Amino acid sequence: MGGLTTAFELTSQPGWQERFDITVYQLGWRLGGKCASSRGDNERIEEHGIHGFMGSYFNALPMMSEVYAELGREPGQPLATFEEAFLGSNFTMLWEWRNGGLKPWPVRAPSNDIPPTDGSYYKGVQTAIAAIIEEVSEMLTSTPGVPKIVGDCIAALLEKAREQALTIPMSEGPNHPLVREITDARSFISGVVKAIDHLAPKIAEHANTLRQALLTLDFYAALIVGALTDNVEVNGYDILDPENWTDWLTRHGIHAATLQSPVVMTTVNICYQSPNGDTSRAARMAAGAFLDWTLRSAAYMGSVIWSFAAGTGETVVAPMYEVLKRRGVKFEFFRKVEALRLSADGKRVSGVEMTVQATLKDPEAGYHPLIDVKGLPSWPSKPHYDQLVEGEYLRATNIDLESYWNGWPNAAFPHLKTPHTLREGVDYDQIVFAIALGAIPYLCKELLTESPAWRDMVANIPALQTQAMQLWFSKDMYEMGWSEPLDPAKNELALSATYFCPPNGNAEFHDLLKWECWPKDNQPKALWYFCGLMPDYEAPPPFSDTDYPRRQSERVKAQCIQYLQTSIGTMLPNATVRANNPAGDPNGLDFDLLVDTQNRAAQGVQRFDSQFWRANIDPTERYVTSPPGSIDCRLEAWGSGFDNLTLAGDWIYTGLNVGSFEGATMSGKLASFALSAAPALDTIIGYPTVPRPQVVSHRRHVPPPFTAASPGLRVVA
């Protein structure tokens, strides 16, 4: 997505055709990277994991609104407008470990009238603090059982805080009066929380709701006091890079009960910050990245979450492809990058070696990648074999062209064994390297040998495996025991990031079922997604081990089954064996509830075979995390150290520095700026306005370039 954003930004400039000739080279048959999705059996949507936009995606949401405006679909066509494609939601279900088990903690954030089509309203710390003040005010107004003395005290604090946040510059930092006001109030709040905890077994449910509100308030207080005390408005967030997030919150006085609550854990859970992907270990995240992400999240546009009306491939990737194709960007599918070669002086990339994975029967016509599903342009789960010379062989052998362990090309097609090399000065002038960080050790060996900065980046920024599954049920969520009523008129979704690990994220997307094609007598009523990390302590085997993907898929299958057998009853108590039989397991899933069109006679755990699960193990699929000491090792878009190589991807330095679609979008804008001086840096919302500090490494950070690109550049992404 960083590469596609780069192409979008370059081609958004007037007269770009006179300056650039852009070609996107893509592994396999579909675009999107970790956001790629496709259609499987019954045209069901199959994803790498759970995807959606935060309301704080100040760059990604406006970009997609531009995409849809240019897409120009006719009224009545599926997802004709941005408003039809992106649906705001303010509900999330948190889960708190309390009294020996997970307890639901439903959260409904207030909506606001800030349009998601223009992120320029976000001005950093001041905007976030103002948003937190309004959210707290709304939360306390709607929380039952607030004692009058507590309500009066907090209301007075909020009124004064509003004025101080608007009239006194955040650059006052530790001298800002909010620090003193909030610090004084926190002692009072902590006393109330302790009293509620002491009385918890004896008090009514509304008092627990009050407790949750006060814990949330304490968390926000820690964020505000910490941000001002460390003066991130002046110093930036990077100065906090060496410190772990929990140490930072503790240093700024967070209550012990708050630190253990799910409202604090949400950021590290949705951002997958467990070391080595092992959720049995405490999450580690650079304090600056944690603070920046969390403050932005509080300053959302319109809604906390903007979900997709269809799959990610249909809602995001296909529209971007159609717009870029229409603009004149070239696409070369079935191109697997094997190596970047350096010039003799080590200053430039002199060649890009690729494997041509398949050849077209009609090269002049090009490859047509999309399919139509109920009028919606979509990505198939397999290539269009009928367009490929090698198609029938690939169909018969079911070779996965996205896998690094596929053993392809093989001896049956010797013409594909010869690398195709793009040559500097002949095929390109500038390269945008938008391949995921996990692939760099394999593709950029010469660059790693030449550059200590590249070696530091690879050594200090982890790229982790993840796992995902999707389940189609014959009963709806309420029939299976989901307890919290949701309002479909407000697009409230059962969405959580703090459930049992390792796939602690889950979501129910029954609204997507209308885009799938199921038999009338065997239609699912619920669609649950689960996604999380996968422990990763051993180096992967050589790519010649073609059985490795199967073994990892079986590993994920076994882990998913075990998870469902032990963890489903808390969330969906009526989906258990005992709930559907006179006797049986009171917590494990009744697998007979799974919709199976492959083998309707299958019983029990056999029915899981018809569901979808995925091991995201390939170098291009790994999730990039942000542990302490890693931010300083991120290279800038223009800081590759090689004259004709620009970088894009959520693993580069964006200021946000958290694996996300927003980070990828920012990276693409930064890559475009590196090549063309546009868009201007001050229009990339959230990119730091202060110079990047030298924190840990001895590498000199590269300041932004300010010269425009030369005319007539050939750019490859």
Image (tube, rainbow, N blue to C red):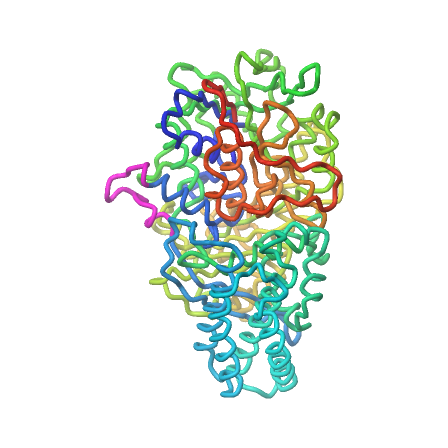
Q: Is residue 51 above or below residue 37?
A: below
Residue in front for this viewpoint, 41 or 377: 377
The magenta span reads 69-86
Q: How many marks?
A: 0
Q: Quadrant of residue 260?
A: bottom right
Q: Position of residue 592 (x, y in %)?
A: 51, 57
Q: Is residue 77 magenta?
A: yes
Give the residue at x 63% y 65%. Answer: 174
Q: Is residue 588 above or below residue 689?
A: below
Q: Position of residue 469 (x, y in %)?
A: 55, 49
Residue at the left extreme of this rendering: 75
Give the residue at x 34% y 35%. Answer: 372
Left or right position of 82 against 402: left
Residue in front for this viewpoint, 597 or 472: 472
Left or right position of 377 against 21: left
Q: Position of residue 418 (x, y in %)?
A: 61, 12
Residue in front for this viewpoint, 513 or 310: 310
Q: Is residue 653 visible?
A: yes
Q: Is residue 477 magenta?
A: no
Residue in front for this viewpoint, 264 or 438: 264
Q: Is residue 246 above or below residue 72?
A: below
Q: Is residue 190 above or below residue 251?
A: below
Q: Is residue 586 visible?
A: no
Give the residue at x 67% y 64%. Answer: 249
Q: Quadrant of residue 487?
A: bottom left
Q: Position of residue 342 (x, y in %)?
A: 67, 19
